[in-house]
Image: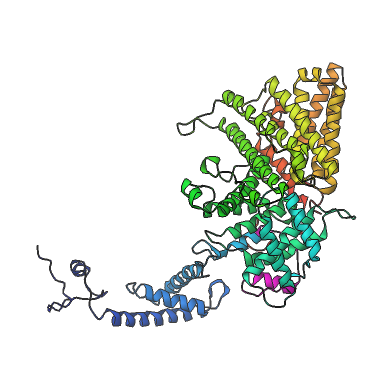
Amino acid sequence: MKQPKCSNCDGAGVQCLTFHASKQAEDLLRCGQVPRNYVSDLEKQVEALTQQVRRLERQSRPTPLNGEASNSPALSHSSTRLSGISPLLPAPSASDGSSGQVRDLVKSVKDVVVEPSRQPRFVGQSSGITLAKMVMAAVRVDATTPSSANERHQDNAPASISAIERQASLPPRHAADHLVDVYFQYRTPHLPILERAPVKEALGNAYQAASSTRTLDHAVKKDVFTTYMVLAIALFDVPVPSGGRPSQSEGCFQSAVGLAEHVISYSPSDLETLRAVLLLAQYVALCPSRGSFWHLTGFALRLCIDVGLHWETEEQSMQTDAAVLHERRSLWYCTYQFDRMLCILLGRPFGILDESTRVPLPGPYTACLSHDAHDAHCYESYNSLFKMSKLESEIKHVLHNQTWEPKLAYPRVDYSAWLEDIQPRLQHWYETIPEPQKAHPSTIFAHRAYWDAVYSNAILLLHRPHSIAQHPSTESLFMTFDASTKLITSIKSLQREGKIDIHWKAVHELFMAGLGIVYVLWLSEELRRQRTASSSISTLNSCASTLSALSESFAGAAGCRDAFETLSAATIDWLLTHDAEQERQTRLALERQVEDLLQQLRPPREGMAMPTAEDDASYMSNMLSMDNFAFSEMLSSTAQWPSFENMEYVDMNHHSVNEMGFGTDWWQ
């Protein structure tokens, strides 16, 4: 069938070029061609519509949008662009509703073009929010001088080494070299975020820039940031005569934060940004008052997923350079370790499931290049910690799996068979840890008590009360008691040696171990017969005294210390009671004390209700069960970090424990 020609064709066989709005759609569809004069007609329509929009803007000037002048260049440019986008739109009339339509139109366009958001440093396609601002919102920045504050808010403002030195100056070079060695001896909290050679190179560039007055470029800013972060972390554990945190460490941290906006950018293949976020998280893990460890870890995990570090194919492992492969794996497992430490400790959901990851452990590439045997031992220790995190992740997954409604896609695990399988694997892990005597004498890996604490904490996680074991077996009760006792002993030994790495984490584990002792003593008559009262009392006193010692360096331990001392005193009185009626009265009094203490420690959260004694006959079991979300949140409050309130710079100088259920300042 012959295709009919549209009425716009001239019949001379000359093809039409473009589209004319005034012609009928049927003819255009049949022909698929448009007249030559489209451009000139369109330009006239654009000009007419532009004048019409400007006239309507002048009419709407008495009510400017968002307090901005309606004749601003940005809005005029947006309106001009909009009028040229859609020539087929009917011309707006001068009615009362037209000005409102224009304001809505201008507002929608303004929201899209507020920033050139396709640049790498922006998050999303039209958010106008930089990743650096999101990261900085999760970091506490103390009040600084107006000039330095203005420098932080200006993305393009040049940063000089003199501006950085207002927060902290670089130490003498020989002292900095020593602190770099300290950083790699401790690697607190023991993660291979950085390698020694790049750090030494960054240190050299930073000192070279310090002796120069020229403006720093991006590469030098990154080196100065890395240098200050390494110094801040290395200085954190240095004791000071006056007590508290060393001012030099905080000064270096502030100097690094002043450069964070210049070195953090959003790019799907930028490992340096991931490394910078992990360094900030590493410091905040040591000093929670300086930011939100939870949100920094979340940013790092999402950056890993954007880069694709969570899934490594066989093709990647075969074709990627060994150094790059080692770097990618190391950064992934650093992020994984942070996420698992937080989620397992606080009873929160994982940022990513193990089933969604496939990354081999970091190989011995860097260790082979290093001539220091201690460095090689460190990498073996890191891998051992990563393996334990995987085991603990499996334990938590299975325990929660038992409470799900079984489905074909998510069948319920045979708990008894799995329990028989996981216990030998935990024992094998403990038997194959790197030999402590081969570690550097200064590192925590050289202390057997550290590895005992890691193992005991995993055993306690496995056997402590949970929803599928309301009435634990005698074996589980004995395992809980023994693991709690060993964990208390290990943490006490580390505290005396000054080797506690993350104080709030130690407080969590110690408090939980103490509650495990109290729980088993009250529940198991058989254990009370086999364990002497004096040994149980000694363990309770050790836990209380260690919590008291930790409260001197970490004020957040004071709440747990006071709560546990009350429970411990009541338990000791009960152990020494022989009269049956008096024993019953003492137990009822203890239960009331537990309820009152948990209500006091509980952070204020809407919709969360603590269980009551009337809800269940086994009130003590439910109250001490770590499966209870309210109970987990109570433990979380002992190391609560500043809240993530908005996407601007957050000044959290006035955050106090009053917001979290305590009566004194938390971080002072």
Question: What colour scheme was applied to this rendering of the protein?
Answer: rainbow
Counting every numbered tag in the picture gives: 0
* Residue sticking out furthest to the front: 371
Relative vertical location of residue 655 with respect to residue 471 in this rendering, above or below:
below
Quadrant housing the C terminus: bottom right
Q: Position of residue 10 (x, y in %)?
A: 15, 79
**Residue displayed at 68% across by 49% down:** 191
At x 69% / y 60%, what residue is drawn?
199
For the N terminus, the image quarter is bottom left
In percent of width and height, residue 289 lies at 75, 54
Residue 611 visible in rendering: no
Q: Nearer the viewer, residue 411 or 630?
A: 411
Q: Nearer the viewer, residue 472 or 375?
A: 375
Residue 181, compared with residue 419, is above or below; it is below
Looking at this view, name the residue that lies furthest to the left.
1
Q: Nearer the viewer, residue 534 or 192?
A: 192
Q: Which residues are magenta?
A: 137-163
- Residue 297 placement (x, y as % from top left): 63, 51
- Give the residue at x 81% y 17%: 529
Q: Residue furthest right?
A: 241
Return the residue nearer the eye: 407 or 494.
494
Based on the picture, tell me whether residue 351 belongs to the magenta stretch.
no
Q: Quadrant of residue 141?
A: bottom right
Q: Position of residue 371 (x, y in %)?
A: 69, 51
Residue 153 lies in magenta, yes or no? yes
Q: Is residue 128 left or right of residue 565?
A: left
Taking the image as drawn, is residue 391 in sight? yes
